[in-house]
Image: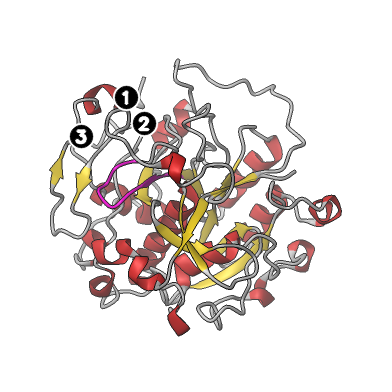
Amino acid sequence: MAVLLVGAPSASAADVQSQQWYLTAMKADEMWKSSTGKGIKVAVVDSGVNPDTASLKGQVLADEVPKAVAYKATEDYDGHGTSMAELIVGTGADGGLKGLAPGAKIVPYRIATTELTDKSESSKAPQVAAVIRAAADSDAKIISMSFGEDVERPDVLAAVKYAQSKGKLMVAATGNDAQEKNFIGYPAAYPYVVGVAASDQSGTVGKFSEHGNYVDLAAPGLDVPTWCDNTFRSYCTSQGTSQATAIASASAALIWSAHPNWTANQVLASLIDTAGRDWAKDDPSTYLGYGLIRPRMVLEQSNFNPGPANTDPLARENATGVTDAAGNSPSASTPPSPQPTKATAGGKTSAAASTSDTSDNTTMWVALGAAAAVLVIGGGAFAVLRSRRAT
């Protein structure tokens, strides 16, 4: 089984760190005074992670990958997984990417995606379900999955439920095909998985970003630098829900590091409670979910109340299940596709084709770094297009 990686590279970035606009918008320098993610391990399930880039030296715990699912975990066939890892924990050494949680560590896992065209290599790659179970049995607290497909698989669903029972926080990309068919993307649509949409510097959701009642949060995902390819010679400006997923995972790592006794439910609840939005918390958007992540709002409150440890903040969604635009549940009997999974940050959506447009896309201008959300709705289509998740 291969999947789709989700994000698309475009022009080269001369000074990569100057292109990381979201670090300034989210006031990362201030957050790092409270937390860098130290002590938190993030399992990156992707195309593999190259531990030898300048920004990842000392950041990748390859020895902690179980042998049964360790096949070429540190050989990235696409550059995608390495990019996601750098967005999470990159040190910025030698001008490389600076991760949002540079004190955290990465446990790398390789799966087959559509970018892995060698059939022999694809067949040797560990199955997604096996990887999720392995990560669940590890001491990684967060499982970051920047990939997706439009098929629900019973073995992966069972693995997700197992990981949830082990107290893991699972984060996944919602997908980049909204302009084509806006399919329901898995694993983001599985219960207990946080589906992340992509926004730009203004808080506008990318036109490519999948929408539906499985979108839980939004994070920066447009004009984000990543490696251009697996030669690791240069960075390119890219966009995708993959990038947003990595940044959301890093945000969770910052909070969990500052509050090591919190559960996954409490970390997620804090992100939901402080997300930037102008609608009622109990009426989430199909484009932005509960809003744009703002981890600083949690970190600056030492006595922040995250709610009960055992209360699932997505309980309503998990009980109701995923529905399509017509309010129908997808067929559980759809035969699994033999096609590879897509990476949600590389793939089929070009940067030029994915620019935001307020005429037919949900728009929210948010001061991500402000002490309180400053929200102004742009465009008259917002009220119509921000359809409700609840039925």
Residue 42 is at least partly visible in this image = no
Q: Nearer the viewer, residue 159 or 28?
A: 28
x and y percentages locating residue 109 in the rendered image: 66, 62
* Mark 1 / mark 2, whichever is N-terminal: 2
Label 1 crowding class (10 Å Cα cut-off): few <14, some 14-19, many 20+? some
Determine the secondary structure under disc 1.
Answer: loop
- Report the residue marked by disc 3: 279
- Report the residue marked by disc 1: 387
Residue 61's tag is none
Determine the secondary structure under disc 2.
Answer: loop
Amino acid carrying label 3: it is Trp
Label 2 crowding class (10 Å Cα cut-off): few <14, some 14-19, many 20+? many
User: Do the residues bearing badges 1 and 2 touch, measured as CB atoms within 8 Å?
Assistant: yes
Residue 191 to residue 115: above or below: above
Whether the magenta-drawn stretch holds residue 204 is answered as yes
Whether the magenta-drawn stretch holds residue 15 is answered as no
- Report the residue marked by disc 2: 286
Q: Nearer the viewer, residue 115 or 85?
A: 115
Residue range of the region highlighted in magenta in the rendering: 195-205
Q: Is residue 50 left or right of residue 6?
A: right
* Mark 3 / mark 2, whichever is N-terminal: 3
Residue at x 36%, y 46% (from the top left corner): 218
User: Do the residues bearing badges 3 and 2 touch, measured as CB atoms within 8 Å?
Assistant: no
Amino acid carrying label 2: it is Thr
- Residue 75 figure quarter: bottom right
Q: Is residue 87 left or right of residue 285?
A: right
x and y percentages locating residue 208 in the rendered image: 45, 38
Q: Quadrant of the N terminus?
A: top right
Q: Nearer the viewer, residue 257 or 231?
A: 231
x and y percentages locating residue 170 in the rendered image: 51, 51
